[in-house]
Amino acid sequence: MKFKIFAGTCLLLAALFAGGGFLYKNHQSRAYDFLAQNNASTFIRDHSPTRGSDDAKVFLIEFMDPACKTCAVFSPLIKQIMDAHPGKIKLVMRYAPFYDGAEYVLKILEAARKQDKYWETLEVIFRTQSVWAGSDHPHPEKIWQFLPKVGLDLDQIRTDMNDPAIEKIIAQDLADARTLNVRKVPGFFVNGKPLETFGRQQLYDLILSQIDVQY
């Protein structure tokens, strides 16, 4: 009899725990929906680099770090998804430089944007991570040897990367990342909904769910 009571209590506690987890996730999702509707700038700032059609109804917001290996791995995947659904998805890039040396590289990336070479530079940054973004001893200055391939004016980059406006952009993105509880990169949101279980298929499923809703 005592064992039955104990077993029943354990089952009840497990059910309450599972239910509590569901309610927490549900509440969290509603909170993000609220932010998306009432404080969209937390997800998308005027300074945020974007890629995709201006008529797109599905916004994929990515908080990334240029030294993040997973960010580099997901970059071609996101391009494939966007190519598979032309005109329906807009990528919004946000910064969360959690790794050492990442902020230095972000300043170069933002300076490259002034020369209309943002996405080309980001591709080179991701492709050469193994050279400049060592996990224990990063050497972000080594990125300079690869920048001529993008066709950048390097002297201008060195000047523009010190623009205080770039520091403000990075600081604002970090503040928004904290507001949205982004603790790891890449951090994804689709129309304000967070990717709660991380993975390639999970991200694709979340994007598809919003495409189904919007179109």
Image (spheres, rainbow, N blue to C red):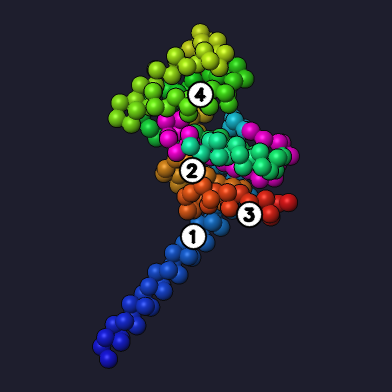
In front: label 1 or label 3: 3
Q: Nearer the viewer, residue 76 or 29?
A: 76
**Residue name at image x 51 percent, y 47 percent:** 200
Pointer 4 local density, CA inside 10 Å: few below 14, some 14–19, many at least 20: some
**Residue name at image x 71 percent, y 51 percent:** 214
Amino acid type indicated by mark 2: Gly
* Residue 171 can be seen, yes or no: no
Residue pointed to by mark 3: 209
Q: Is residue 117 above or below residue 8?
A: above
In front: label 4 or label 1: 4
Disc on the earlier residue, 3 or 2:
2
The range drawn in magenta is: 51-72
Outermost bottom residue: 1
Residue pointed to by mark 2: 187
Decide whether residue 151 is among the magenta residues.
Answer: no
Q: Nearer the viewer, residue 161 or 88?
A: 88
Determine whether the residue tagged by mark 3 lies in a helix, strand or loop: helix
Amino acid type indicated by mark 4: Val
Determine the image quadrant of residue 15: bottom left
Residue pointed to by mark 4: 124
Residue pointed to by mark 1: 25
Amino acid type indicated by mark 1: Lys
Determine whether the residue tagged by mark 4 lies in a helix, strand or loop: helix
